[in-house]
């Protein structure tokens, strides 16, 4: 037995072209950032509606911190369950049109806690190949049998479900908007499968909340199948601009999770000030529907602009635009060159995406101006031949 040799491990990561380092962002989040001391247009934030830097949210958070303090002091089940948590839960339930909602401190914790509470040994999980890492980890923690079905392949999903023992519980889980590809889960077909086979369906609306569906109510609402979803998860840290997450469904589901989801039970409650800024975020998206409209218009402009350059950007309506490069090093090289041109885009490499599928994950914000998008398209144009190599 010998201790870990960190340097050797890091050298191995570097050899694979998968070394990651932290970029220093100065100042507030917005469409332009200071990245490692250089000003750049940000095309890699999930702050889709620009709410992370919204003064009304900041004011709500500051006021709540003054009135209620900066921390909840304990978990919800001990002494940390404050009125404002319940108010936010009711607000989200109303917004999503579901019976009851439970807050979690982050989306990662929500997925890990909920999946491991819903299934266990002898049960089955059916998970899309491209689901978020937090779903993968929740599935592993549950000790259920994990069946990974090919991306969006509902025929394969149904074959798998039909072939499994009917005694165990069955849970289908999928991102609704996929985080690295920006494409959509075929929720309507999945709903039919879960009904035919008596399975439960959980969806992760991290990238759909505040973006898809009327008023940002999510993809299930857009597809007209929200009433068929057993468990809906969403986050407060992406389009809603803050931090935290929620899981919703029937009142009984939530009661069960309060009693069994370990990442809910054994963690400090969300700070009241964060609940306050989340409430303000819902006020803003309800009062200013033009933010979502602007976002979707910007998505169209950038997708079209890149397609016109002959870049291999898929059709789609979500603000997540993948540009697959393939090789890890080449991906990071293009990132650097874009940053030299004042455009900040992150390269995404394995294990976040499959081998040989390294990519630029480009995201659009409602606050990007026409000029921002034109400058981005100009930068991609100047690198067209490098990208195509
Ligand atoms: C970001 C993300 C999460 C995790 O949410 P956090 O609140 O950031 O922990 C979960 N699922 C998906 C699909 C995500 O993109």
Image (cartoon, rainbow, N blue to C red):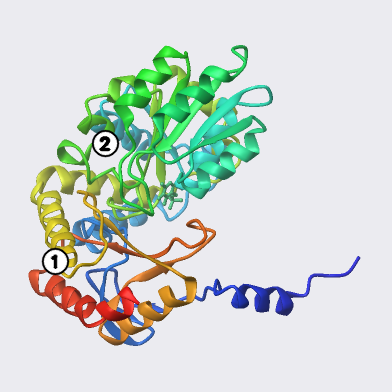
How far from the left and from the top, in percent, is residue 110?
A: 49, 40
At horizontal 55% and vertical 43% (from top left) the residue drawn is 136
How far from the left and from the top, in percent, is residue 161?
A: 52, 21
Residue 348: which quarter of the image?
Answer: bottom left
| Residue 200 to residue 238: above or below | above
How far from the left and from the top, in percent, is residue 258?
A: 52, 28
Mark sitting on residue 340: none
Pointer 2: what residue? 219
Q: Nearer the viewer, mark 1 or mark 2?
A: 1
Some atom of ligand 1 lies within 8 Å of the CB belonging to the residue at label 2: no
Left or right, 284 with respect to 200, comes to: left
- Residue extending furthest front? 389
Some atom of ligand 1 lies within 8 Å of the CB belonging to the residue at label 1: no
At horizontal 58% and vertical 44% (from top left) the residue drawn is 137
* Callout 1: SS: helix
Mark sitting on residue 308: 1
Residue 121: which quarter of the image?
Answer: top right
Looking at the rendering, in which quadrant would you find the C terminus?
Answer: bottom left
Judge the density around disc 2: few (<14), some (14-19), many (≥20) Cα neighbours within 10 Å.
Answer: many
| Residue 328 to residue 352: above or below | below
**The one of 373 and 90 positioned closer to us in this rendering:** 373
* Callout 2: SS: helix
How far is the residue under mark 1 from the one under mark 2?
28 Å
Q: Which of marks 1 and 2 is nearer the N terminus?
A: 2
- Residue extending furthest right? 1
Judge the density around disc 1: few (<14), some (14-19), many (≥20) Cα neighbours within 10 Å.
Answer: few
How far from the left and from the top, in percent, is residue 90?
A: 31, 30
Looking at the rendering, in which quadrant would you find the N terminus?
Answer: bottom right
At horizontal 34% and vertical 51% (from top left) the residue drawn is 67
At horizontal 39% and vertical 65% (from top left) the residue drawn is 359
| Residue 255 to residue 332: above or below | above
Left or right, 352 with respect to 335, comes to: right
């Amino acid at each position: 037995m010998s201790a870990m040799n960190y340097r050797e491990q890091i050298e191995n990561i570097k050899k694979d072209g998968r070394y990651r380092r932290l970029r220093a962002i100065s100042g507030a989040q917005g469409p332009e950032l200071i990245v490692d001391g250089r000003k750049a247009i940000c095309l890699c934030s999930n702050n889709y509606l620009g709410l992370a830097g919204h003064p009304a949210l900041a004011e709500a958070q500051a006021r709540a911190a003054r009135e209620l303090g900066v921390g909840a002091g304990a978990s919800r089940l001990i002494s940390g369950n404050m009125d404002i948590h319940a108010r936010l839960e009711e607000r989200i339930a109303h917004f999503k049109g579901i019976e009851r909602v439970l807050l979690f401190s982050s989306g990662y914790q929500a997925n890990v806690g909920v999946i491991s509470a819903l299934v266990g040994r002898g049960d089955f999980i059916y998970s899309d190949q491209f689901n978020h890492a937090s779903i993968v980890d929740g599935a592993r923690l549950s000790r259920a049998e994990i069946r990974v079905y090919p991306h969006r392949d509902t025929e394969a999903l149904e074959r798998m479900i039909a072939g499994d023992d009917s005694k165990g519980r069955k849970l289908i889980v999928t991102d609704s908007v996929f985080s690295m590809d920006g494409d959509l889960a075929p929720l309507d077909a999945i709903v039919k499968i879960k009904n035919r086979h008596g399975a439960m369906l959980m969806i992760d609306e991290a990238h759909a909340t505040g973006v898809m569906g009327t008023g940002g109510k999510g993809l299930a609402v857009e597809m007209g199948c929200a009433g068929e979803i057993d468990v809906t998860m969403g986050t407060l840290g992406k389009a809603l601009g803050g931090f935290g997450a929620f899981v919703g469904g029937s009142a009984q589901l939530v009661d069960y999770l309060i009693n069994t989801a370990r990442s809910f039970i054994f963690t400090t409650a969300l700070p009241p000030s964060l609940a306050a800024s989340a409430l303000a975020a819902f006020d803003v998206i309800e009062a200013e529907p033009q933010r979502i409209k602007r976002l979707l218009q910007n998505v169209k402009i950038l997708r079209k602009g890149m397609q016109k350059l002959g870049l291999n950007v898929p059709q789609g309506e979500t603000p997540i635009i993948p540009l697959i490069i393939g090789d890890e090093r080449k991906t990071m090289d293009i990132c650097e060159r874009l940053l030299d041109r004042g455009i900040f885009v992150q390269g995404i490499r394995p294990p976040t995406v499959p081998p040989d599928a390294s990519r630029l994950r480009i995201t659009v914000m409602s606050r990007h101006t026409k000029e921002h998008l034109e400058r981005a398209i100009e930068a991609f144009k100047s690198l067209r031949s490098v990208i195509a190599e």
